Image (spheres, rainbow, N blue to C red):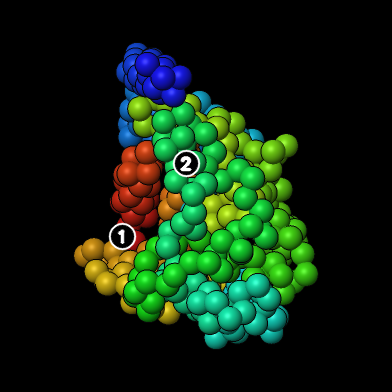
Amino acid sequence: MTVLSITLSWVGVAVLVVLVLGYASSISRRSPSAVGDPALAAELGRLCSRRTRRLAASVVDLGDHPSTRSAFVRCDAATRFEIGSVTKALTGLLLADALERGEVTLQTQVGEVIAKAHGTPLGGVTLLELCTHTSGLPRLALRPMTLLRVPLHGLLGLDPYRGTSPTSLLSAAARQHLRRRGHYRYSNLGAAVLGQVVATVAGRDFSEVLRERLLDPLSLGGAGVSTPDQHADWGWSPLGVPFMPWVMGGYAPAGGVFATLDDLTALAQGLLDESSPGQSALAPLHDIGAGRQIGLFWMTDTVAGTGRQMVWHNGATGGYSAFFALFPQARRAVVVVANTSGRKETERVATALARWLARSRQDL
């Protein structure tokens, strides 16, 4: 056998061991109990399973009888969670804020801001196309390093983005071909490019713009862009494989933010009472089919049987998942974050909590 084949064999054995041990540990745990608001904790405890690790949830009601409730499973208010693509919703708020400042328009082209994009397919893409996922850019920059990192991420829980700088991201984006431009095609690359455009016109790094224009005004002191020195703990796949924190560098505007439940709850309150910067990001701009619309990254669905809207975004990294939903007409919100990447499970809990809140406060 060659050295490569022996190495791959040992990697396969290691992965199998990790999967078996992770799954065994998950099914051996008792069903968790939740702490926090008694009523919400009781409901959350009912919804969680033995495979739940750390999970936190809040429900916000700014209606006739305002209340904010939070509950925690194996964590507390100071626990950091990676929020994955909920970061895109924050980037949308920053874009809306930049529009209000007159720094850009939705028809601003990338090549007008990023010199290296001028004369490339990327250069003619507008900010509107980027924030509605209609630019034609691929999900990730297609390059040899991506082909190597993605399987290592899946097998060994490594960070597929680490080491990507804003400069290398924009250079890679400028080399991409646009496919089905004008049609909805979800793109982490496009979201990252948009965030770097907003940062460039502001004359700062993306993390600094996020802090100055959104996090500080809303007092989201526990949130920030992940760096090698500041990040959430290791998370887990649904099968129990540990995944290292994602430090996304140039891709940060697409999914590189961590936050506590209190941060996300304060954001929900700010959006519901319209005190948040970039409020106009929530307004739908483009129909993407199946009854769904998109604004500046924010999705809008109609709640079945009510005719009312849910404005939302979800997210997942290698070891975390999040769901953030607003019900503007009822002035309510539901937030769920977990340190496992089982996005469907997190959405199931969030949907159930929304229904629970509706039953306790009448229909959404």
- In the rendered image, residue 255, in percent from the top left (x then y), is placed at 54, 52
Give the side of residue 6 with respect to residue 228, left or right.
Answer: left
Q: Residues within 10 Å of mark 1 (few under 14, many from 20)?
A: few
The answer to whether residue 196 of the structure is visible from this angle is yes
Between 162 and 290, the one lying in front of the other is 162
In what quadrant of the picture does the N terminus appear?
A: top left
Precedes in sequence: disc 1 or disc 2: 2
Determine whether the residue tagged by mark 1 lies in a helix, strand or loop: loop
In what quadrant of the picture does the C terminus appear?
A: bottom left
**Residue 363, labelled with which disc?**
1
The answer to whether residue 57 of the structure is visible from this angle is no
Determine whether the residue tagged by mark 2 lies in a helix, strand or loop: helix
Between 347 and 159, the one lying in front of the other is 159
**Residue 173, labelled with which disc?**
none
Q: Residue at x 57, y 72 (%)?
A: 279
Three-letter code for the amino acid on which mark 2 is drawn: Leu
Is residue 62 depicted above or below 350 in this figure? below
Q: Residue at x 46, y 35 (%)?
A: 152
The picture quadrant where one finds residue 201 is bottom right
Q: Residue at x 30, y 60 (%)?
A: 363
- In the rendered image, residue 335, in percent from the top left (x then y), is placed at 47, 49
Three-letter code for the amino acid on which mark 1 is drawn: Asp
Residue beneath disc 2: 148
